[in-house]
Image (spheres, helix red, strand yellow):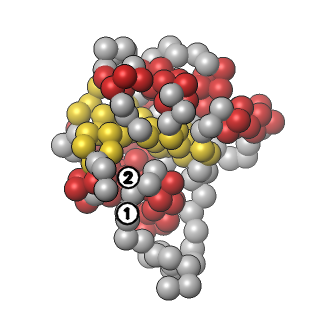
Amino acid sequence: MQKKKIVVAVSGASGAIYAKVLFDKLLKLQSQIEEIGVVMSDNAKDVWKFELGTSDFSNYDFKFYEKSNFAAPFASGSAGYETMIICPCSMGTLGRIASGISNDLTTRAADVILKERRRLILVARETPFSLIHINNMKTVMEAGGIICPANPSFYSLPKTMEEVAATVINRVLDLAGFENESYRWGE
């Protein structure tokens, strides 16, 4: 298996637990990963602190990039990043991507991934959706993106908040092409 170069962006939507579980699982998948670049908005850092009560996002051994750093390697298609996961993805971030507005590193990287026909996975986190949200999702999907709403499943009988979040993140990792141990229906 060829190792993957992956971008993870964390927007300021509620659901920092999804980003934390994604980070934890990516650490366990290091043998499948060549490089991980991470972008977190200022709001994402604030939401993480509020919802999880820590600032431990900075303790992960990933390469973090400032949201204004357009010199980051994944701001260009020539760097060869195959997959981008935005987790959680706010409706504002989704709307900017759908409109082609590259006003920060997250939206620029998403634009690059789409133009290069690579894998963009948006873990949409909002409820309920407005028609504007749904139309933006449709636009991103028509451009080749994947919308994976942060809707957990319960057939694995999760017991903790992390296990509930993992039901979504395991699907995201499947969509990203990782070999990941997780509950499979019927097993």
Q: Give the class, few, some or many, for how many residues have Cα within 10 Å of label 2's Cα (few <14, many ≥20).
A: many
Residue assigned mark 1: 179
Q: Considering only vertical position in the picture, is 185 above or below 141?
A: below
- Can I make out residue 77 in this image? yes
Q: Position of residue 167 (x, y in %)?
A: 49, 65
Crowdedness near tag 1: few (<14), some (14–19) or many (≥20) residues, C-alpha within 10 Å: few
Residue at 23 percent of width and 33 percent of height: 63
Using the rendered view, name the quadrant where residue 21 is placed.
bottom left
Q: Which quadrant would the N terminus be assigned to in this image?
A: bottom left
**Label ID, residue 22:** 2
Q: Which amino acid lies under the numbered mark 1 shown in the image of this protein?
A: Glu
The relative height of residue 166 versus residue 125 in the rendered view (above or below) is below
**Given the image, on which type of amino acid does mark 2 rest?**
Leu
Q: Residue at x 50, y 76 (%)?
A: 184
Decide: is 6 above or below 66.
Answer: below
Q: Residue 31 placed where, x, y %? A: 22, 56
> Which residue is more in the foreground, 79 or 15?
79
Q: Earlier in the sequence, mark 1 or mark 2?
A: 2
Q: Residue at horizontal 47%, vertical 34%?
A: 11
CA distance separating discs 1 and 2: 14 Å
- Position of residue 150 measured from the top left corner of the image (x, y, whole percent): 57, 53
Element carrying mark 1:
loop
Q: Is residue 13 visible?
A: no
For mark 2, give the secondary structure.
helix
Q: Which percent across, then down, holds residue 60?
A: 22, 44
Q: Nearer the viewer, residue 181 or 43?
A: 181
Name of the residue lying farthest toward the right = 131
